[in-house]
Image: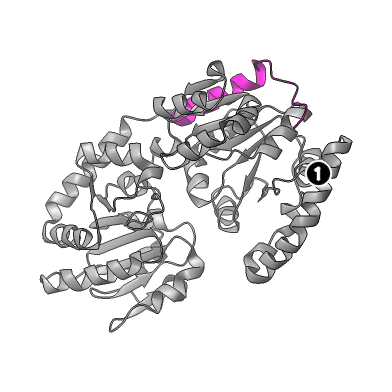
Amino acid sequence: MSVFRHSAAALTALIGAPVAAVTMALRPSWRDGWRERIGGGDVSAGGLWVHAASVGEVTASARLVTRLRERGHALTLSTTSTTGRALCARLHPDLPHRLAPLDHPWCVDRALRAARPRALVLVEAELWPVWIAACARAGVPVVVVSGRISDRSFPRYQRIASLLSGTLGRLHAIGARTEQDRDRFVALGAPADRVAVTGDLKLDPPDAPPAPSPELLTWLGDAPRVVAGSTRPGEEVALLAAQTEWERAGHRATLLLAPRHPDRAKEVAAMVRGRRVSLRSAAERPLAAGDVGVLDTLGELAGAYAGARIAFVGGTLVPVGGHNVLEPAIVETPVVYGPHVSNARHTAEMLERAGAAQRVDDAAGLARVLVESLADAEACRARGSAGRAVLDLHRGSSERSADWIERALVDTPRLASGEGA
């Protein structure tokens, strides 16, 4: 490490240490895996290192991981969140998995020395400048798959394009979701010959759609079900109000709330008034019409969508940008969401064109669509089937992404030396 880099790293560590201490005091979840966050922990040396930020990216990359294993690659998986790591453990129990190192020179250098990966694979929008620069110095190719630059991020990135271009120039290959994403990467400084459209991993439907476990199925009960996935603060109140509206219209159904952050489960349950509410982790008896269930477990949302009358996807009534609108469509469940879908704009538009999804402006519009859906089960089944059919047209992104990764291993473009990182 150069004198300049060592001094800069020492200075940032000195400044960051008190911040990290306060963060761990206020957020106990950050204490879990702190050794991994500073570059320690057990690793499997060699092979490909696949990094997916959290639950959504881990789910999206699951088929790619399977394809890479089928092609004989050894793998190490990492995530940024402990919930993502838990899902890695459930989906790939026999693969090494860890939390990613903090984007600090000492942390990433320590992790790379231990792991010695053949390549680093970043899923979607994980552009960590220090980590990428460290890989460039170590001769480790970095490949982005299912790469996206959202409507919200693109203007911000444009303002720092001169800084971002150095990071993008160190990437060996970028597999973009769409032509628009490809054009945005190039506009921000990525060499055009290193960017190709390989597709959206979330659009590559599994051969066998996820199904609820027998235990989850028993808890969900037999009543018509409205499932609200990845909800954010403010959205649960709107959904509970919608439940009152559909009952006034003469419909009885279960409402299942799945907060984006499971540690909010008790907070969400406390919002329910005058109804029986049940946490999944404390499932006492099956849910019945009029009840509210709160999903506070990991890895069960996709199965809970299966068989629902309709699904609401959160982060859309509030200005977050939306979460995975495809999970319900994979299991033939129609989707409704609010106006804020910048993180999933092209997939939302695709489902809307197929008639499988509806976008509403506000809580009143959400209540109206839920009332209509509970009144017409046949229309919901038709919309759900249309969603699955349009996804089946997009098979193959996992295979194309695996091809792109392997090409980077054997046909790496000449990169800048990485000096000055």
Percent across and percent down for residue 47 are 70, 33
Q: Which residues are magenta?
A: 397-421
The image shows residue 331, relative to residue 407, as above or below, that is below
The residue type indicated by label 1 comes to: Ala
Q: Secondary structure at mark 1?
A: helix
Going 87% across and 34% down the picture, which residue do you hit?
Answer: 2
Kindly tell me whether residue 55 is visible in this rendering. Answer: yes
Q: Quadrant of residue 21?
A: bottom right
Q: Residue furthest front?
A: 159
Snapshot quadrant of residue 216: bottom left
Q: Which residue is mark 1?
A: 8
Image quarter of the N terminus: top right
Front-lying residue, 162 or 375: 162
**Quadrant (top left/top right/bottom left/bottom right) for the C terminus:** top right
Q: Give the residue at x 22% y 59%.
A: 366
Asked whether 388 falls inside the magenta stretch, the response is no
Q: Between residue 318 and residue 40, name the one nearer to us.
A: 318
Query: How many C-alpha atoms fall within 10 Å of the one at disc 1: few (<14), some, or many (≥20)?
Result: some
Q: Position of residue 278 (x, y in %)?
A: 38, 76
Which image quarter: residue 152? top left
Q: Nearer the viewer, residue 145 or 69?
A: 145
Q: Is residue 174 above or below residue 201?
A: above
The number of callouts visible is 1
Residue 353 screen position, x and y as percent:
22, 36
Residue at the image point whose x is 59% and y is 36% from the top: 122
